[in-house]
């Protein structure tokens, strides 16, 4: 599990494409300090498993499902990426519950700069729109953010100077793709309600009458 608080802005060393998979190598001196084989590191919000690590770099295998559902396949050597290690027991919980499981991709549609901050608008795919609420949490490229405003097909966030300086969201331009992960609690609530037994109005009425 992650919290959406980016620890380091890493750099893509290489992305080697196979027939239906890829192998990604990233330079990240901070997140590799305690890396072990099998450790989880989120790259632009995608939970990936370390298969090799040395000299401040780590390598992960990327399957076809991940390539098809995220923006990972469009990366190239030299690109910056947001990195976060899996949360350890006893760590501060600075963001919100993030699984590193991308639900959809979106694009940046507008950037409006302020004096030291910036409002960024993203497209909102209809497949995940029902899970997004104003002032709720959403993960964009692995960054835990608060939805500032919400439209039928878009949403905005306000980025503080720290986020602009220390994550990829400060460098992306209109048209660039991003990975979205909605609040997992909303998905579980929806699933539970789908299996809830129907309300029996007749039984309720009989009980109220008896009492």
Image (cartoon, rainbow, N blue to C red):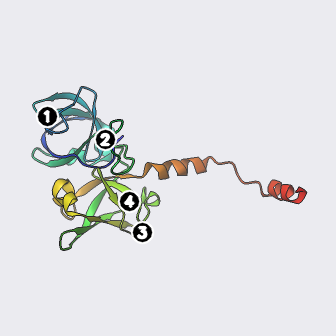
The answer to whether residue 111 is left or right of residue 47 is left
| Residue 91 x/y as whole percent | 33, 41
Residue under pointer 4 = 125
The answer to which of 2 and 105 lies nearer the viewer is 2
Q: Earlier in the sequence, mark 3 or mark 2?
A: 2
The vertical placement of 34 against 163, above or below, is above
Q: Secondary structure at mark 4?
A: loop
Q: Earlier in the sequence, mark 2 or mark 4?
A: 2
Residue under pointer 2 = 66
In the rendered image, which quarter contains the C terminus?
bottom right
Residue located at (36% from left, 40% from top): 1
The vertical placement of 115 against 173, above or below, is below
Label placed on residue 57: 1
Confirm or deny contact between disc 4 and disc 1 (CB under 8 A): no
Q: Secondary structure at mark 3?
A: loop
Residue under pointer 3 = 152
Marks 3 and 4 sit apart, C-alpha to C-alpha, by: 9 Å
| Residue 129 x/y as whole percent | 43, 60
Q: Secondary structure at mark 1?
A: strand
Q: Earlier in the sequence, mark 1 or mark 2?
A: 1
The answer to whether residue 93 is left or right of residue 84 is right
| Residue 140 x/y as whole percent | 30, 55
Marks 3 and 2 sit apart, C-alpha to C-alpha, by: 27 Å
């Amino acid at each position: 599990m992650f919290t959406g608080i980016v620890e380091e802005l890493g750099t893509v060393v290489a992305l080697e494409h196979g027939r239906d998979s890829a192998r990604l190598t990233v330079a990240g001196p901070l997140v590799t300090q305690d890396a072990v084989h099998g450790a989880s590191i989120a790259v632009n919000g995608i939970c990936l498993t370390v298969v090799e690590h040395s000299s401040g770099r780590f390598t992960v295998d990327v399957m076809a499902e991940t390539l098809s559902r995220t923006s990972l396949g469009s990366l190239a050597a030299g690109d910056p990426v947001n990195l976060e290690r899996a949360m350890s027991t006893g760590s501060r919980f600075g963001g919100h519950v993030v699984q590193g499981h991308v639900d959809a991709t979106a694009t940046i549609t507008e950037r409006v700069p302020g004096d030291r901050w910036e409002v960024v608008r993203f497209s909102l795919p209809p497949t995940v729109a029902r899970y997004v609420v104003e002032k709720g949490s959403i993960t964009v490229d692995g960054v835990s953010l608060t939805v500032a405003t919400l439209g039928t097909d878009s949403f905005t966030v306000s980025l503080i100077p720290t986020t602009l300086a220390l994550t990829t969201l400060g460098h992306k331009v209109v048209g660039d793709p991003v990975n979205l992960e909605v609040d997992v609690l909303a998905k579980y609530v929806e699933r539970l309600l789908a299996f809830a037994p129907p309300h029996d109005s007749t039984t309720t009425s009989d009980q109220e009458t008896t009492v």
